[in-house]
Image (cartoon, helix red, strand yellow):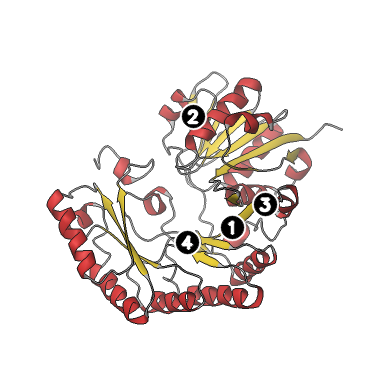
Amino acid sequence: MNAKRRVYFNEFNLLMGNTTYLPLVSGLLQAYALTRPGLAEAYDFRPFHFHIDTPGPIVARHADPFAAAFSLSLWNEQLGLEVARRVKERYPDCVIVMGGAQVPHKPQDFFAQHAFVDIAVRGEGEEAFADILERLKDGRGMEGLPGITWRTSSGGVKSEEGERPFQRDLDAYPSPYLTGLFDSLFIDHPDKNFQAIIETNRGCPFHCTFCYWGKGGLSRKYRYTSLERTYGEIDWMAAHKIRYLFNADSNFGMHRRDVEIAQKIVDSKLKTGFPEAFRSCYGKNTDEKILEIGKLLHAHGLEKGITISYQSVSPEVQKNIKRDNIKLSVAEGLQHAFNAAGVPVYTELILGLPGETAQSWVAGIDTVLEAGLKNQLYLYICQVLPNTELADPDYI
C-alpha cells in the first residue's frame, strides 16, 4: 500500500505573548477536503502551523511534504512567502499553493516574482483546495477549475477566469470546531492561550473601494451558517474555555438573527464564564438592532466598545470611496443613542483617502468629536491592498 502524501497548512496568526488564534482558515480547508471521497485515504493532513515564528523552525516542521498550503494576510505575507521559498528549495517536488487576501486575483506578476509558487487560488478556498487535491491525487492538470492560476510544466502561467456556482448554504463547509480538528491543539500546545474566530455569514453589500470584503471578496450576496451550527460553535468554545471571541462577519447587527446570536453569547458567559469578551465589526446604516446588541453586550461586560466607523466625513471622499450610500446621520444618531445608554463607542477615520485634504481632514475630526464621541478615536493610514478597487489602475 502506498504511503499517504503529506499536506501542510501554514496560517501564521499573530502571537501575543503566549496568546494566538486557532487557525480557522486551515481548519475549514481540511474539514471540507475530508468530505470528498478518497482524499482522507490519499493524504496525511499534518498538524497545523498556526502562529508567527521565525522561518527556520517552521520550515523544519515540513517533513517530506507533498503539498504546502499558505493563507496570506497582511500580517503574515512576508513570512509565508519566505517559508514557502525555503520549503520549495529543500523539497523541489512539493506543490506550493497560495491563497488569501494578499494573493492577487490577477497573479501573473506574483508568479513572476515568486518562482516557488505553483498554484494560486482566487477568493474562497474550500472547494478550490479540495479540487486541487483531487487533481493532484489523480495526476491531472488544473484546467477547468474556476479561480485557479497555476504554473505549467513548461514554466508558463495559466488562469481559469470562470466563477464557481454560488454556494448559499455555508453549512456545506463543515465546522473545524465541531468536527474536532482543533481538539488536539489544546493537548499538544498546553502553553498556548487560544482565541477563536466565529463566522456566522459571508458577504458585504457595500462597495468601499479600500476594502477587500465586497468587491475583492467576490461575495456581495449574503450566505449564512445555520443557527444550530453557530450555537454549537459557541458551546464548543465555552467548553474549551475560549476567553476572547472575534466575529468575522462584515456587518454584525445588520440581520435580525444577530440579536439572537448575541443573546446566545451572553447566555454562554452567564452559564460557563466564557467567552469573557466578544469583538465584532458592526453594520452600517443600521440602528435599532445594533443599539439592542450593544446594550446587551455591554451590560454583561462582553464589549469594551461599539464601533461606529466614519472613515471620512467629507462628502467628496465618501463619493470617491463609494460609501456615499452609508448615511453619516445614522452613525451620528447611533452615537448619541449609545451615549445616552452609557455604552462606550469608538470610531475610526482613515487618513489619505482619495479626495481628502488637510482642511477636510481637520474638519472631519472636529465633526466626529462634536457629534458626541466620548471614548476613543482611531486614526489609520490609508493602505492600498491587493484586489481592492483602490489598487485598480483605472480607478487610480
Viewer-side label of 3, 1: 1
Q: Are marks 3 and 1 in contact (CB under 8 Å)?
A: no
Question: What residue sits right under mark 3 in the picture?
Answer: 31
Q: Which numbered disc flags the more N-terminal residue, 1 or 2? A: 2
Q: Amino acid at mark 1?
A: Ala
Viewer-side label of 2, 3: 3
Quarter of the image where one finds residue 395: top left
Viewer-side label of 4, 1: 1
Q: Nearer the viewer, residue 113 or 158?
A: 113
- Res. 92 visible in picture: no
Q: CA distance from mark 3 to mark 1?
A: 16 Å
Question: What residue sits right under mark 4 in the picture?
Answer: 249
Q: CA distance from mark 4 to mark 1?
A: 13 Å
Q: Which numbered disc flags the more N-terminal residue, 4 or 2? A: 2
Q: Are marks 4 and 1 in contact (CB under 8 Å)?
A: no
The residue drawn where x is 31% and y is 45% is 389
Q: CA distance from mark 4 to mark 3?
A: 20 Å
Q: CA distance from mark 1 to mark 2?
A: 36 Å
The secondary element bearing badge 3 is classed as helix
Question: What residue sits right under mark 1 in the picture?
Answer: 196
Q: Considering only vertical position in the picture, is 367 above or below 292?
A: above
Numbered tag placed on residue 266 in the rendering: none
Indicate the quadrant containing the C terminus: top left, top right, bottom left or bottom right.
top left
Q: Amino acid at mark 4?
A: Asp
Q: Amino acid at mark 2?
A: Lys
Question: What residue sits right under mark 2 in the picture?
Answer: 158
- Res. 205 visible in picture: yes
Number of other residues with Cα within 10 Å of mark 3, as a class: few under 14, some 14 to 19, many 20 or more:
many
